[in-house]
Every structure is written in structure tokens, then in C-alpha cells.
Image (cartoon, helix red, strand yellow):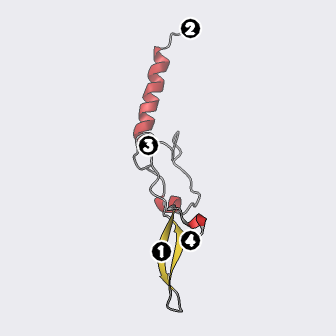
Amino acid sequence: MPRPAYRSRSLRRVKTKTPGGRLVTHYEKRDRGVPRCPVTGLPLGGVNFKAYRFGIPRRAPSRPYGGVLSHRALARALKLAVRSESAAPQQS
């Protein structure tokens, strides 16, 4: 039976043949998926997927919420902010 840490399915199992001819199981981290917007679920534009996958820090897009929200979610949020700002009573 494997160690308790290896019983989880968060690590993927890889069958490997040793030089002695035995077949053993190695446990590896799973590959990260494509970065996605938490609101719409769309893949994020302007983010280097290969660098993201391996955890290499890269510059995100310079727009507001770049690398966090998709373009659709950002457009919707900006429209709502402008509309709520213009609907609020103007005080002079």
C-alpha cells in the first residue's frame, strides 16, 4: 500500500521501468491548465500559457485586471461602473 501522501489523486501516477527490469510507480504533479477568468470561464488573453504552466513569473497585460479577468468581464464591469456613477445624484 502506498504512503498516505501518495493515496491522493492530486498526484498523477506514472509507470516507470527501472534498470533492474522492475515496473515501479512514480508520482508526479499534474500539469496546470490554461489560466481562466473566474467570472466567464474564458481563457485569459495575453498570458503566456507555457510560462504559466511551469510557474515562471511573467508580466501580465497592463490593462486593469490584466491577467485576472477576461476582456468580456472587464467590459461588463466598466460599463456597470460608469452607469452607476452617472445614475448617482450629482451634488454641487
Choose the circle earlier in sequence order: 3 or 1. 1
**Alpha carbons under labels 2 and 4: distance apart:** 69 Å
How many numbered marks does the figure carry?
4
Q: Which residue is mark 4?
A: 2
**Alpha carbons under labels 1 and 4: distance apart:** 14 Å
User: Which amino acid is tagged 4?
Assistant: Pro
Residue 5's disc number: none
**Alpha carbons under labels 3 and 1: distance apart:** 35 Å
- Cβ atoms under marks 3 and 4 closer than 8 Å: no
Residue 91's disc number: 2
User: Which amino acid is tagged 3?
Assistant: Ser
Q: Which residue is mark 1?
A: 14
Mark 2 or 1, closer to the camera: 1
User: Which amino acid is tagged 1?
Assistant: Val
Mark 2 or 4, closer to the camera: 4
Choose the circle earlier in sequence order: 3 or 2. 3
Choose the circle earlier in sequence order: 2 or 4. 4
What x and y, as percent, mark residue 25?
51, 77
Residue 41: quarter of image: top left
Residue ranking furthest to the top: 92
